[in-house]
Amino acid sequence: MKKNIVCFCMSVLFVIITNGQVVSSPNNQLKLNFQVEAEGVPYYSLNYKDKTIIKESQLGFVLKPSYSYFSEFKVEGIDYSTSNKSWSPVWGSNKEIVDHYNEMLVHLVQNKTGWKLDIRFRLFDDGLGFRYEFPVQKDLRHFTISSEKTSFNLGKDYKAFWIPADYDTNEFPITTSNLSEISKLIDDVRKEPLAAKAPSATLAVQAPLMLKSKDGIYINIHEAALTNFPAMTLNVDEKNFILSSNLTPDKNGDRGFVQTGSVSPWRTMIISNDARKILSSNLIVNLNEPSKIEDTSWIKPTKYIGVWWEYFTGGGSTWAYSDDQDIRIGQTDYGTLKPNGRHGANTRHVKEYIDFASENGFDAVLVEGWNEGWEDNQAYRKEHIYSFTKAYPDFDVKELQAYAKSKNVKIIMHHETTSSAIDYERQLKEAFQFMKDNGYSAVKTGYVGPIIPRSEYHDSQWMVNHYTYVAETAAKYHIMVNSHEAVRPTGLYRTYPNWIAQESARGTEFESFNGNRPDHTTILPFTRLIGGPMDYTPGIFEGDLSVYGTNKARLSTTLAKQLALYVTMYSPLQMAADLIDNYKKYPDAFQFIKDVAVDWDSSYILEAEPGDYITIARKAKNKEEWFVGSITDENSREATVDLSFLPKGQKFEAVIYKDGKDASWNHNPKSYEISRQNVKSNTKLKIKVAPGGGFAISIKS
Amino acid sequence: MKKNIVCFCMSVLFVIITNGQVVSSPNNQLKLNFQVEAEGVPYYSLNYKDKTIIKESQLGFVLKPSYSYFSEFKVEGIDYSTSNKSWSPVWGSNKEIVDHYNEMLVHLVQNKTGWKLDIRFRLFDDGLGFRYEFPVQKDLRHFTISSEKTSFNLGKDYKAFWIPADYDTNEFPITTSNLSEISKLIDDVRKEPLAAKAPSATLAVQAPLMLKSKDGIYINIHEAALTNFPAMTLNVDEKNFILSSNLTPDKNGDRGFVQTGSVSPWRTMIISNDARKILSSNLIVNLNEPSKIEDTSWIKPTKYIGVWWEYFTGGGSTWAYSDDQDIRIGQTDYGTLKPNGRHGANTRHVKEYIDFASENGFDAVLVEGWNEGWEDNQAYRKEHIYSFTKAYPDFDVKELQAYAKSKNVKIIMHHETTSSAIDYERQLKEAFQFMKDNGYSAVKTGYVGPIIPRSEYHDSQWMVNHYTYVAETAAKYHIMVNSHEAVRPTGLYRTYPNWIAQESARGTEFESFNGNRPDHTTILPFTRLIGGPMDYTPGIFEGDLSVYGTNKARLSTTLAKQLALYVTMYSPLQMAADLIDNYKKYPDAFQFIKDVAVDWDSSYILEAEPGDYITIARKAKNKEEWFVGSITDENSREATVDLSFLPKGQKFEAVIYKDGKDASWNHNPKSYEISRQNVKSNTKLKIKVAPGGGFAISIKS
């Protein structure tokens, strides 16, 4: 749906321009200055409300082996344009998205080599995106990137919400510190035990990086539309407060293979003095290409349960069918293996989940551990670990599919690859055909451990292409993809709306290992979620894992906060992650999970401060129903819920699920209260939130 | 067809044995001694006719990071057995192959770790094969090899026919020198310009390595049944004359990923005091597993011509359709590209080849340059270079297929990958389905340039698995494979008889670049061909390439020698590589190529000396027809052809195609004479061979 388009272009081609060129955001609050300085090096700087927020910052690349693609440039021409459109996503936190920007496209040419380089800047009201474009040209067709020169010269210290730059994982806990303190803290954070780690050799952090200045300016730095390029991490110059792009190399040290006629991902900065504007920004998704999938009718936001958490509780349930680890896919005859008797994904047990899903209005049941190979799943040097078309003897694909269908429930496929991406590609089409033949329409993919091909990291160019290839191929089979341990998202869900969610951060599963901090989910929406929805898998009611056995882990939230996450952690794919029995124990609280929508007409960021609190309201898609979620960190607070988003004059009933008076995440997490009250658009609710707590509200007429 | 089986086993399990264990070949000429020496290191030595030919030589591995898997062993048991069978290959130089050996299987256990290692030795009358077996065991399931300790302690200098150890290519010219001279010569040889090179860091040569001692003992060292393991090259200790295994690493330096329950390839030594016995040995193919393909009726030895040599002559014909190199597969619209007017694989031209093939009894026409992508085919960092399902606009797949079928000729598919094996795998099944849909039943694959995945070399484990995967997958589509630039063969054509030929050496194409030496084809059967048939592409009649344009290259053989190669270079896939016009100029010589068989009942190695000469006779499969080929190096000689292989008492007519009196490779290569004479089994022909010359004989009743 296009609302209006205004586009005028002033082409200044073939005119030599060396002094600064300026372009502003439509609201005039952001001003970008571009200029080519001494020795032909291109720089940009950025003003926000007439203050310099990004000082002169370098642009360009070094090509392999050591060719400058950042100096000796002159400006060959500049094109200006503006655009104001709106579009409707297949799913999302809002049913319509405005894409309004002013653009400056700079054409550079290098004196000696004649190599051309274009840089396209887009100024939105809430930030800047720019990308490199490599035009088709006579003397440059293929090149290898040694390093990217792009920098973000902050010029002063900022508070940062960061995880260490790592080419293999995004699963570190998030640290809050000044930029100047990162070097002191980073080594300790890197000690976190994770299945695959490949730390950057430099002092560097992962994007999206959330920053806050002492004077209250929020800057989020990330990238958009990451395709056919390595993911960007950010080097930290802690003396001069300059961040700079540190592309993920492959293991040969190459940082991108480029054919001219292509473009880099966008480098993005979302900027505001109001943290809520960071959360409501559509800058990144706007910088992605429209959907490549024409018929999207088969893509459905999904609420699901699954045979999953029981593998983490310490209760003994296993992905593996047998304890015999001597497995060779295609050779091992599972019919002759001794079952271990603790295999989670067995037909009878899955039917219990299907029954519960059906009775409680869930769309789907995820089943992990259904397929051959899990016995040897931690053999990271093994290439052919799993079959994606062969079920365990006690998992009856046909019977379960028929049963699920009769109950109007879908089963979600699981493809853990243990990062043998190369073997996954060999099996991919048969795997998807198997899914199609058996009625599956969504897959959770997993990339635990180091990558095969062994030249690659999770975030190197080849793997970036792999994830996209999987999403594109899945679309051909009408399959939705929820990728875990993949590269962090960059808004590509616009282009591939079947790529319905990702993990790519420290999710709920860590609550069963080393834990998440109480402030964790107050930061994630400002970091990881900036790129796209996360399959965080909330809904854990029983937070004390010692009830299952020897696992001493305890959740870092109250039960009420678990409910709030369904609203604060936007995703069109939401899991109710806990065991069925726990939901049966708390049917009144469970009601909120049953009720909450997973697709939305509108979203309202009511309160937000990274690391402290978030309060969000959303209107369900095509329904007169609203849901509110509010969370806090380890500190108690009073939230204000301004209901002015409700239609004026009408009366509604709000059901409020909040922390009990004595609740706190570490002493009494399961204390909650449910109350009902009438509300109108002029209602302002004041609600107490416990330490590590939260609340959820559903509102209907 | 099993002739007779004698197998008895003496199990000596659980007995501690430390003194030497001996096993002999069935004819008793070879004796292997195995023992575990001080510090538990296993050694073997080998006697030939009561002389020590391999002195005490170490066995074992180092595992990553630096675990000994070669010391602290004790013998836990030894099994002896013997086997005498015969079997019939799907195609071959003989219709029946005897597999007769004595075997010793040594069970080792490491004192501290409890790790087990088995070594299986097989003594044949003509040599030794041994392999490592990694039993399923409690404390070792997956390991990474740092290095292999296997050595071949020759104890004295040998004459060697060698090419440098290189993980990416086998296309060096072959050097003849003493082992002690290699270090002086190798750097110069390595300067040879080749599309991909990855020289071993150590002084090392490629297997198969042909050796000859001063006292006339021939030893060929190679490996058999190379699957799921890196290819072996041979380190040369030029002081002590010890060769040792140098496995092809990946680019991370890892030399093999192993799961217990598997085996290494066989390390092989073919040994004789008669060079002819080296050529007639079936040791390597016997050490491979029987065919995994049950129905082999679709596998057909093939004689073919092709749109190929014209790309090498300098005559201007191109693989590419256009001179525009800015190609993106799936995006570039070839309909709008400007054709260069020199594209070889156009419908009209291919029809000329089909006509010629049909008129002259060829089975097939190879067409290179039929598919999108060749414009950018040297972009070695590009992953998606070609489409394997999209033909150029001027190559009409359907029309050509119908035309070829009407003429009873097959078209051979070509899949050059430019070594983007990873992209080939993505397209593989569609590519084979496309072939099946369009009546193709054989493919020539190509791996020019460095490998993608970028962690790999042509000969590293992953690529070894890739080639096998391609052959296995092709078999499912009833497709024969002729792989070029792949890892050298190790007899796997027994297991995958659809893997009908390979290049993996310096073939005829080099005659159009830097040339092959006159002795080249007198050595190849002792080196490269020891592992399996080669698609050498002989039959070049016009050896002076200056007739086509500016290429000054000249063939290193006489025309008659080109005919002889159809017999001396065994392959079930034989090309007549020259241009049609050249065959039309010499119809009498061409008659031999038309007549010569490509599959055989029996082969007779009549004369052989590596680097000097080879004379071979073969009886056509299921026909009373014999063909003889004889070649020499740069020296003239008189060959003796003892026809005692003919049925006694019968008269036959021999047509002799030999060098003219004034012929020589460098002065008068096209001088030849054709004569006919009656022959019987007691005939001994004496035939003069010109410098760089040869002769061919066809014999019929």
Image (cartoon, coloured by chain):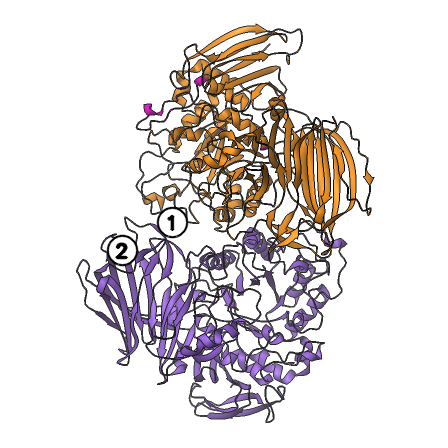
Chain colours: A orange, B purple
* Residue labelled with disc 2: B116
Is B151 on the left or on the right of A10, as rendered?
left
Residue B41 placement (x, y as % from top left): 26, 63
Any magenta on residue A538?
yes
Location of residue A510 (image quadrant): top left
Name, please, the residue furthest toward the left. Answer: B15
Disc 2 to disc 1, how far (Cα)?
Answer: 19 Å
- Quadrant assignment for the N terminus of chain B: bottom left
What kind of element bears circle 2? strand
Q: Is residue B463 above or below residue B509?
A: above
CB of mark 2 within 8 Å of CB of mark 1? no
Q: Given this view, does label 2 or label 1 mark the residue nearer the observer?
A: 2
Instruction: Looking at the picture, tell me which residue is in the foreground, B527 or A300.
Output: B527
Q: In this view, does A477 lie above or below B457?
A: above
Instruction: Give residue A522's position: percent from left, percent from top.
Output: 52, 24
Same chain shared by disc 2 and disc 1? no
Is label 1 in a helix, a strand or a loop? loop
Apparent side of residue B529 relative to residue B360 in the rendered image (left or right): left
* Residue B387 seen in the current view: yes
Label 1 chain ID: A
Count neighbours of disc 2 (C-alpha within 10 A) and say few if under 14, some if 14 to 19, many if 20 or more: many
Q: What stretch is highlighted in magenta?
A: A531-559
Magenta span includes B251: no
Tell me the residue that label 1 is attached to.
A328
Residue B408 picture quarter: bottom right
Q: Which amino acid does label 2 sit on?
A: Lys
User: What's the magenta bit mostly, secondary-structure-wise?
Assistant: loop
Q: What residue type is labelled 1?
A: Arg
Residue A22 lies, in percent from the top left, at: 76, 35
Chain of the residue where label 2 is placed in the rendered structure: B
Can residue B622 be seen in this snapshot? no
Is B233 above or below relative to B325?
below
